[in-house]
Image (cartoon, helix red, strand yellow):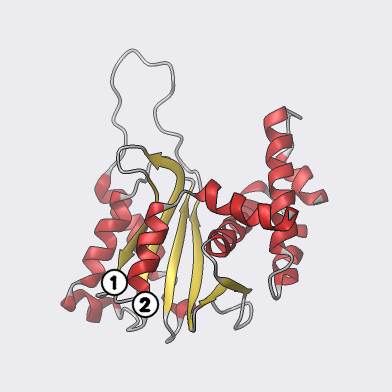
């Protein structure tokens, strides 16, 4: 908590303080998950805000799955393995979490002309590389890659096209896509109001129940609602 304040409260604004209080509440629930102490140690030693936010992305996804009724284990195979294992109704999935850091804030607010914003080809390549870099962690067990996006220049189209590219039979062999990699999850702070989506689940193979239902659950819920459901359980 002390390091959370050090890295997130810079100007002592109410928004910064509210953010820290939110994560403090999340820590209380996360602390009930098996092996959560391993993540708390890294948070306590985080040297900068970006590194801290990488760890917070893992906690966010842990709470998202808890909100969906999963038992969540932290680093079930050790530090070099996947970040989470989620279990529910007799089946389990290993989840490797990754995050896009904010590297381009996009066009400025004050502008007298239209500026180019976004480059789908560049975003596609960046997302593809992100997914490929996680193959080692997911191993040979039923698994998923969960990406949280804080880069405002990347939207849900990039992971959709990247997964479609990897799903092609020829490309699966070229990139050595793990046979048991089930899907890629994408989430960000942005909510698509027309589709009412904040989380997207892109399958790398044909999904059957109960995984098909999990896809529907992820895409029909918003992040704050799922996390609040978990926090309410703690308060109760």
Query: Marks 1/2: CA distance?
Result: 7 Å
Residue at coordinates 73% horizontally, 29% vertically from top-left? 11
Residue at coordinates 23% horizontally, 81% vertically from top-left? 173
First in sequence, mark 1 or 2: give its number. Answer: 2
Considering depth in this image, is 74 or 115 the residue closer to the camera? 74
159 w.r.t. 12: above or below: below
Residue 187: which numbered mark, if any? none
Name, please, the residue furthest toward the right.
2
Residue corresponding to mark 2: 181
Quarter-wise, where is residue 79 in the image? bottom right
Left or right: residue 12 versus residue 199 is right
Horizontal and vertical percent for residue 219? 37, 55
Mark 2 crowd level (few <14, some 14–19, many ≥20, 10 Å Cα): many
Secondary structure at numbered mark 1: loop
Q: Are marks 1 and 2 in contact (CB under 8 Å)?
A: yes
Name, please, the residue furthest toward the top.
112
Quadrant location of the C terminus in the rendered image: bottom right
Q: In this rendering, does residue 118 appear at all?
A: yes
Residue corresponding to mark 1: 204
Residue at coordinates 74% horizontally, 35% vertically from top-left? 17
Considering depth in this image, is 219 or 89 the residue closer to the camera? 89
Count of number-bearing discs: 2
Secondary structure at numbered mark 2: strand
Horizontal and vertical percent for residue 106? 41, 33
Q: In this rendering, does residue 46 appear at all?
A: no
Horizontal and vertical percent for residue 232? 67, 52
33 w.r.t. 194: above or below: below
148 w.r.t. 150: above or below: below
Mark 1 crowd level (few <14, some 14–19, many ≥20, 10 Å Cα): many
Left or right: residue 192 versus residue 235 is left
Left or right: residue 76 versus residue 12 is left
Left or right: residue 98 versus residue 75 is left
């Amino acid at each position: 908590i002390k390091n959370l304040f050090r890295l997130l409260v810079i100007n002592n604004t109410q928004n910064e303080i509210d953010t820290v209080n939110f994560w403090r509440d999340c820590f209380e629930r996360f602390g009930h998950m098996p092996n959560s102490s391993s993540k708390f140690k890294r948070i306590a030693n985080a040297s900068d805000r970006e590194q801290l936010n990488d760890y917070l992305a893992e906690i966010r996804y842990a709470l998202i799955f808890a909100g969906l009724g999963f038992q969540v284990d932290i680093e079930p195979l050790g530090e070099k393995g996947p970040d989470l294992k989620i279990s529910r109704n007799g089946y389990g999935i290993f989840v490797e979490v990754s995050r896009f850091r904010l590297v381009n804030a996009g066009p400025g607010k004050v502008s007298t002309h239209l500026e180019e914003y976004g480059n789908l080809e560049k975003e596609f390549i960046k997302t593809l590389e992100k997914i490929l870099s996680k193959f080692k962690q997911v191993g040979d067990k039923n698994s998923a890659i969960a990406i949280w996006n804080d880069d405002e220049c990347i939207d849900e189209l990039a992971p959709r096209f990247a997964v479609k590219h990897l799903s092609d039979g020829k490309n699966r062999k070229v990139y050595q896509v793990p046979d048991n990699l089930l899907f890629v999850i994408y989430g960000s702070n942005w909510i698509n109001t027309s589709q009412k989506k904040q989380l997207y689940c892109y399958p790398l193979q044909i999904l059957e129940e109960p995984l098909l239902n999990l896809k529907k659950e992820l895409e029909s819920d918003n992040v704050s609602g799922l996390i609040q459901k978990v926090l309410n359980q703690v308060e109760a």
